[in-house]
Amino acid sequence: MILQTLPMVIVLVGLILYTVLAGADFGAGFWQLIAGGGERGRQIRNHAHHANAPVWEANHVWLILVITVLWTGYPTVFGSVFSTLAIPIYVAAIGIVFRGLAYTLQNATMEPRQRRLIDMTFAVSSIITPYMLGTVIGAIASGRVPVGNAAGDLVTSWVNPTSILSGCLAVVTGAFLAAVHLAADARRLKEPRLADAFRGRALMAGVAAGALAIAGLIVEDHDAHRIYNGLTTGWGLTAVIISGVAGITSLGLTWTRRYGATRAASALAVAALLSGWAAAQRPYVLPGLTLSAAAADDSTMIAIIISIALGAVILFPSLGLLFRLSLAGRFDPAAVRRQEPTAGPDAPRPAWSGRVAIAGLLIGIVLLTIADASVAHAFGIAALVVAAVAGFAAIGPDELARNDTPPDALPARRRPH
Amino acid sequence: MGLQEYLLQARQMQAMSFIVHIPLVCFGIAFPALILFVEWRYLRTGDEVFRVLARRWTKVLVALFAAGVVTGTILSFEMGLLWPNFTATFGSVFGLGFAIEGFSFFLEAIFIGVYVYGWDRMSPRAHFLSGIPIAAAGVIGSFMVISVNGWMNHPQGFALSNGRVVDVHPFHALFANTYFWHEFVHMYLAGFMVTGFVVAGAYAIGRLRGRWGRYERTALAVPLAAAVVASPLQVLVGDWNARTVATTQPIKLAAFEGLGATTRGAPEHVLGWYTNGQVRYGIKIPDLLSLLAFHNPNAVVQGLNAVPIADQPPVNVVRFSFQTMVGIGSLLALLSLVFLFICWRYKRLPATKWFYRGLAVAGPLAYIALIAGWTTTEVGRQPWVVYRVMRTSAAVTGASGIPVGYGILAAVYAILIAGVAWTLWRLAKIPMPDPSTGRADAPVEDPAAP
Ligand code: HDD
Ligand code: HEM
Ligand code: HEM
């Protein structure tokens, strides 16, 4: 049982982290859209961009992790969801492309007119993408994705009250998270006016998110009764209460400008909400398909768990480093403190590298091209790797480039030594 | 509505997505290593040229990486959007490769953030070290994806019962696969060739227009050195690939060569066109195919007629791609040998304009070879998505509207390519740092600057 469940827990954790981290990223786009014109609007837009530029790619990878673990651990679920919900997922993907493009372009131009176009692209795609992903959750929650290849309705599966509400909730939650993040960031950059502007936005978005969450429960009572029952009893209810309390707390903390604590509380609210949904789904993932029936072979589950555990050992310290540097302002423009390298004596280029390269090449040809055994091939490749590295060293491109050759040099003559 | 209604469009959409993603991957594989080499030279010598170069290249890397991320995301979505039956049936066998790859993406994305925004904000050493995971992650990432491709070409590590996979051994399926290593090594070299020739080609064009300071020479020589080392080796490795294909996927090999009937002492045909079971208008070299594929001029080589027509790949597509790749590969190896000779004999960069003209086209050619190579592999595997286990037509989605999705994605990719190209062009226009101060700290140089 644990084997069948644990990968789904990983999926859920990934989803929570994606919602919290990438959500803040999407929300930044939302605020860019309604930042207004003029100097102040531009300030808000620039701030929204810079706060996330170093971390957006890492945040995005959570989605990839969710998807890959899903298709490895619960392949039928993945196939059913992605075929029936092809439209919202496809639109979300297109939105992701435009967001990536906008991040790239923002580094290329300062020209206001071009910037406006880029910001607009960024903002619109930052709203569409989480909305579409939210409708996917709503579709699954309301049992509209049957098992099979495109077995559900391609349109009504995600255009329905539950989906629309969860789509909106995803957008507004992101807006709230982003506003808190940007307020904290602005305060660190000693921009109190900007910080207060985002604080006001955070409060608005937070209230809206709470209202949507409550509206969601009412809608689900009519539209997705199974989930409603799950959310109003047992673990589901516990999660909903935690989420509500955490949500209200985070509003209070925003009011008193304790942004660090707000982040923790709002993350908890999101986590509780998504966990509540998962609890309410139990034991079915899709209608008629229980989690254990959906799960892949035990050997695959074990392989996933081991790989993720090993990966996590590297991942979390690295993520910690990135966020520590980013949140501590080490990437801010003001943090530039150039140090010269302490150049030691440069090691001379080994004179024998050319000979090693040729030797590696000859051994490689014999073992890879002429010999037939697989073992010989393995050593042949190793020899060619040596040849490649030694060959590069023998060329010594950095040294080679010191000597000028005039653009129109005539047929070469040997240089005097 | 038949499942296969949109098969053709789905295949084309998959191919288009790859054609955009794979060159970016090449930069993910090779470019971090080249940048780190240059930065390492800066650390050892304190020479400003290296520092400026590494910084400017970093910005190119960021732009390309962002495009790699989003096009890769499209590809992972397509696993479900286009091929839900494939993933739903075999996800538990091959999916692990992608899940592990996810971690390499994390490493790459995290350390790109640190590396790019850490310029001048960390000690030079720490900054250099933060670049190493990027280079490692590019290798791990491609390793994992190719293990999946190797498995699709040579499936193992599972059994089928009533259309469901049982007895799955994912590690065995992916990493104990004999069809994997040749693809990995070949792709890795291709990464260095594409990156090396494209980057060097850009500076070669600059030279033809008279930009030829020490900065430009270094920027040309470093990627070029990597590419000219990789190119001759690529020919040897490619020959190894062909021999592996000959033993594991004989029908694919027959398609490479347009060999209609099983033949003892099979000839090789250069150029020409395959119809009615033979190659017409080609240059025939007797016995060569048997010799190349099995090291024996009298060896028997299986022909396409060993399987029914319905199980044969589209021969001319495969054959044309294969010959394109081999032709370009040979040309680039030749260009590399010219360079190596000049370098060895005269201890300097080539002086003739012709070399730089050749270099300017070498980049696009390497890219074409890359795509041609993947077309050879993937189309040569048809009609199977999992070789001899699942047909591509059984893998495709039942959702309608694929043509619309394909059209929109094509338009979006056109915008993406134009946007990235424009960004790179803008980056190239950023003026060089003031030589009198030797500093590269002009604010516009700073990726994090407002
Ligand atoms: C810069 C790119 C490039 C160049 C110059 C070459 N190749 Fe290649 N080739 C690839 C890029 C590539 C590739 C795109 O990376 C492929 C696709 C699958 C793979 O493993 O590598 C490939 C596949 C591939 C295959 C099919 C492997 C399979 O289906 O598993 C063969 C037989 C060769 N190559 C042979 C050659 C030969 C004999 C070359 C020398 C002249 C050559 N390639 C040059
Ligand atoms: C079905 C095939 C493929 C899928 C599903 C896929 C998926 C992805 C995804 C999701 C990313 C973005 C990672 C991020 O968010 O940071 C990515 C990038 C990358 N992919 Fe692919 N990919 C595929 C094919 C390939 C191939 C053929 C290769 C190499 C041989 C490759 C190697 C890489 C590398 C090295 C990156 C790093 C990004 C970069 O440097 O631009 N992928 N891929
Ligand atoms: C894992 C899921 C994959 C599926 C379902 C898949 C399937 C396909 C299909 C159906 C095509 C079109 C072939 C045709 O046009 O006849 C294709 C093309 C291609 N595939 Fe795969 N493939 C997958 C993975 C990979 C991987 C992992 C790689 C590389 C490592 C790869 C590289 C390519 C390339 C480069 C093309 C383009 C060939 C062309 O130019 O037509 N694929 N793939």
Image: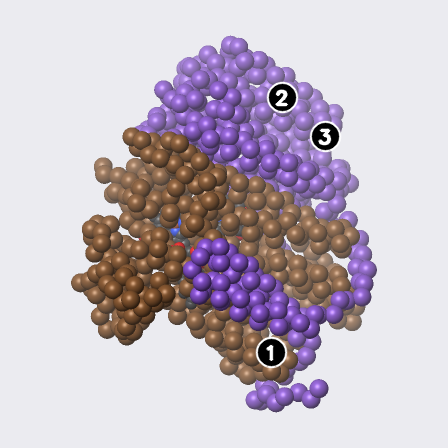
Chain colours: A purple, B brown
**SS type, badge 2:** helix
**Relative to B335, residue B165 above or below:** above
* Residue bearing mark 2: A247
* Residue bearing mark 3: A260
Query: Residue A331, how many percent across, how many down?
Result: 72, 47
What is the crowding at mark 2: few (fewer than 14 residues within 10 Å), some, or many (at least 20)?
Answer: many
What is the crowding at mark 3: few (fewer than 14 residues within 10 Å), some, or many (at least 20)?
Answer: few
**Relative to A169, residue B420 above or below:** below
At a point 64% along the width and 49% down the height, the residue shown is B133
Instruction: Give the residue type that dot 1 points to.
Output: Cys
Query: Residue A49, how many percent across, how many down?
Result: 63, 45
Give residue B343's mark: 1
Instruction: Give the residue type that dot 3 points to.
Output: Gly
Tag 2 subunit: A
Task: Name the mark nearer the viewer: 1 or 2.
Answer: 1
Q: Are marks 2 and 3 in contact (CB under 8 Å)?
A: no
Instruction: Give the residue type that dot 2 points to.
Output: Gly
